[in-house]
Image (cartoon, grey):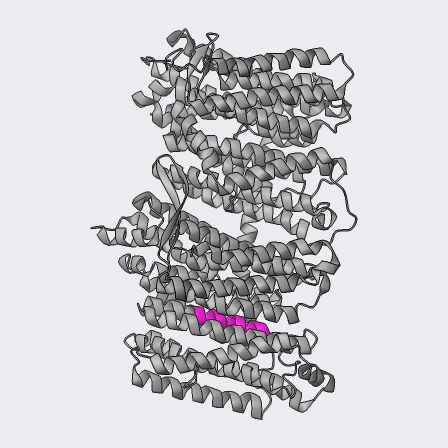
Amino acid sequence: MLPYASGQEPAIYLIAVPLLLLVVSAIAQVYSRSRKLSFVSIIVLLLISGSASLYLSGTGASFRFLSVLQANGFGSLLFGAISIAIVLIEVLSYGNTGKLQRFNMLLSFVVLGAFLVAFAYSIIAILVGVEMVILASAFMILQSGKNYVEPAVKLFVLGAVATAVFTLAMALLFPYDVNLSLVGALAAPIGKFIIGMSLVLFIGALSIESAAFPFNFWVPDVYEGAPGNITALLAGVNKKVALIALIEITMLVFAAYSASGGMPLLSDTLVILSILTMFFGNLAALVQRNIKRLFAYSSISQIGYILIGIAVATHLGVESSIFYIIAHMFMIIGAFAIVFWLESRNIRTMDEYSGLYGRNAFAAIGLTILMLSMAGIPPLVGFVGKFILFSSAVYGNLAFLAFVGVINSFISIYYYAKVMNQMFLRKGERHISMDRNIAVVVAACLVFVIAVGIFPQLLLGAASAAAAAL
Amino acid sequence: MYPLTVLLPLFVGGIAALAMGVSPKSERYAKYVALAGALGSALLTVLLLVHAAPLPSQIAWFSAGGYSFHLELSFTSANQLLLLLIAVISPLIFLYSVGYMDVPSEQSRYYFLMSLFAVSMTLLAMSGGFLTFFIAWEGLGITSYLLIGFWYHKEAPPLAARKAITTILVGDICLLAGMLMIWSIFHTFSFAAIISGAHALATIPTIIIAAGVLLLVGAFTKSAQFPFHEWLSDAMEGPTPVSAFLHSSTMVKAGVFLAILLIPLFIELKLLWLMLVIGAITVLVGAVTALASDHIKKILAYSTMEDLGLMFVALGLNAIPAALLFFAVQAIYKALLLMSSGTIMKANGDDVNIYRVSSFGRNRLLFISALIGALSLAGLFPFSGFFGKVAIDSAAVSNVTVYVVLTVADFLTALYIFRWLFVPMGNQRRAPRSLIIAKFATMKRSMQAPQAILAAGVLAFTAYLFINGNFAVNLAAASIETAVVVFGMLAAYIMFKKTTSMLSERSRARLLMHTSYPVNAAYNLLAASVIGIARGAEAFERYLNRVLYAGARGVVGLGSSTKVAENGNVNTYVAALAVGLVIVLLLLILVP
């Protein structure tokens, strides 16, 4: 990883400058009246920096800049995906009655946080980035209205605890690596116990934000309590940022530690977390009647699948985790978009979903495709993702983990089928029309789910390069 | 010709049928579009097989971590046979549906699902590797689920659909797990490569044997073998063309088909006994239950189960030609018989009890086709079913237990199928109802024609077997079989035609048989325990919250003094995190 190696540095300015502009303009526009200007500027700037980021990941360049950041295939691919996801969230929120400008300012902090995590060269950058994402989203919930104080406070407190644990983990590491950098850290691991403890604390802190069992208790309450568009942000982006940080820390910071005998600890911890998370999420989802809670539990279980790849820690494992992180981002945003829209029509529980097909066929078919994809039915993107995750587990000598995953993905079909049953196998009464901005988001997610499902190489190639860049 | 083009007409037809659902005006024509699609695909299939002699091929799908994953297609004789069967049966089913499905509002959904099913089935028939096979297999499961629950406004179909999908999901888990385990050893999904890889192994690793068992369990669930068979009879809640297509002649064969494709692997793994045992049990259970049932379609469903059991017995005896022969023969007569029962239901206002319906009126065509089907199913010389059964019987001669089971089943088969035929006719003779007789006389052409064609197909198949029948038949087995079948038919004649039925009273033993009470009770117990675990997980979460809440007040100190606490359980969550961290840290000590 040489600095200034490949001559692609100008691309970084295409990412960073629009991003700074984004933050500055979003702050400035809090005092302006034009919703439209705020909407357009955030989308245009995000698309510029997102596509520059995707371009950068395509070139395979890797270099350091600003002394705490680095660009490589991994970060730029994931930041590109996140910026597209945030564009979708912004489109989703356009119809909201709240003050869009304020929302956008907070959203721009989320973007900045995600950027810091994805391009981090130092653990400090990760800490700051993760913290920014969490704080900004807590305030986003808070400014949505008086009824939302409770989920906002919960998220805030949980974020604070996660930060505390994270900082403790950093402090344990500090004596052995004063730079706290991601690359070349811990070249000579001494004091194995302390370093192991630091690793475990890192995993714990990031599990709080990515909601792995037993750190997931806040998720259903916060997801159910928050407005639907912010729930989509929490499930689609926040969790993924924490997972990106987790991959960076386990694969980079502790690379030398794992190589010198720390691998069993890393892998065992993640395997246990993964199994518990999958089972807990799926089993609890089985008995939910509220659809938002159902998807909250389902997204918990999906984190368990992603952890499989990180636990395996081979090239294939990391590659499939990256693939699934991006795939799930779009699946869950699409699903929560529909849930968000129906929530505004006062349709929340399983019984109220009955006959949705008769009331709005697009929503019912769209939600079905997204759920089938999450359940892992071919030829949708979720199938390819789970398939390579399980393959990586089998090949990484964790065949039982693959088996647990297979069992879980079929448990999940059962509750998805229950929702489908309600939507299709009952008669619907009145037609309800879908808002245009929501239809756009759902359609975009569906295109992704189907296109990448049929031509997985579109994303797999990039994911493979990203995994190789680590 | 590129093999996958075969799928195109069906696919386009299905999508067009769906699109035509937007207005009632165009929905009327959806059936013709779908029928045209089915015909087009059938023609292309025949062209492909006769003209182009397709070769196995691979389509690169994606590559990950240095491995590339392909969609393999292959055209072994088993593949070609299934393709041909689908090509023959699917247009006939679509034609039958044109007459049978006369509810105007549900047309486009029905034809879309049927076309999608036919696409998956054709893909399954072409598959030469696990990846292709699994995709098609999942397609079959989903379309079958949606088609069983097609009459969603009624009480029973959604429940039947749920039962079917739950059972089939067990099979899906086993199939996926099995194929991944096989991949971990051979790094390929191609059937041919896996088989040659298994030949080359000096010792068979345990993981492959486990994988083989899982694959077989997957096959058993899809092909309704004991104890996974109950969904099949419930599946008869779907529309009759669906039962004739999916649940008797094509989809339920998917499991048998998997076993046929991989039979060299199972021989290598010494797993034939498993097929033999499960197959033989299923044959008996199916035959006995078919005799006990009153439901005009469920009798045939249990009979299908018995037939599939016979195929597994043949495979278990390593009599692959016999299995393939029966595979082909059974599809045609069973589709025919289910169409017949659909016709009877239609004329009798959807009544399904054989003790209430009347059959065929003065319509000779319908009667003769049903009779041909029944004779073939019973296995009377010289109908096509005879050849299939005798081939299996001959293979079983060396194994006395199996042979006895098969012979008993032959007798029971003749008995129940003529019960199925005679009892409704007796009802008609005793109390002729002119309205129903008139309905049979004016039965739609589109429903009569497929039955006549399939009956002609049975006869043509019979003639073909006479001319080309160069397979080993044990003459003694053939004569015993014929004698048993004739005896069974005679018994049926005496019991159900001459006199009124002796099996009609609801004795306790019979009730036990035809409701399959023990099997269903076992299912319910299993389902209840899973839901119980799920509720337990939720309760555990709540309980843990409460315990932690109590602890949190003391330990974390966020107690009731802060406003936060009144807003919810944040302090509980924080305490949960603390406990979680402690547990994770304990790992440090436990893991060296």
Question: What residue lies at 48% left-to-right and 87% top-to-bottom?
Answer: B489
Which residue is at the far bottom? B498
Which range of residues does the magenta coloring cover?
A: B293-308
Q: Does residue A426 appear left or right of residue A173 in this picture?
A: right
Q: In the image, is residue B256 part of the stretch drawn in magenta?
A: no
User: Residue B112 in the image: x percent, y percent?
Assistant: 61, 57
Query: Is B305 covered by the magenta stretch?
Result: yes
Give the number of marks.
0
Residue B2, position as x, y percentages in the image: 43, 54
Q: Residue at x 62, y 16 (%)?
A: A109
Q: Nearer the viewer, residue A170 or A253?
A: A253
Q: Quadrant of the C terminus of chain B?
A: top left
Quarter occupied by residue B524: bottom right
Q: Is residue B167 visible?
A: no
Q: Which of the 4 quarters of the picture holds residue A393?
A: top left
Pick whichever, B111 or A364, lies toward us.
Answer: B111
Residue A327 position, x and y percent, is 52, 34
Q: Is residue B532 above or below residue B368?
A: above
Camera-nearest residue between A445 and A234: A445
Question: Residue B383 placed where, x, y %?
Answer: 43, 83
Rendered-image quadrant of the N terminus of chain B: bottom left
- The foreground one among B550 and B445 is B445
Q: Would residue B189 be found to the left or right of residue A47 on screen?
A: left
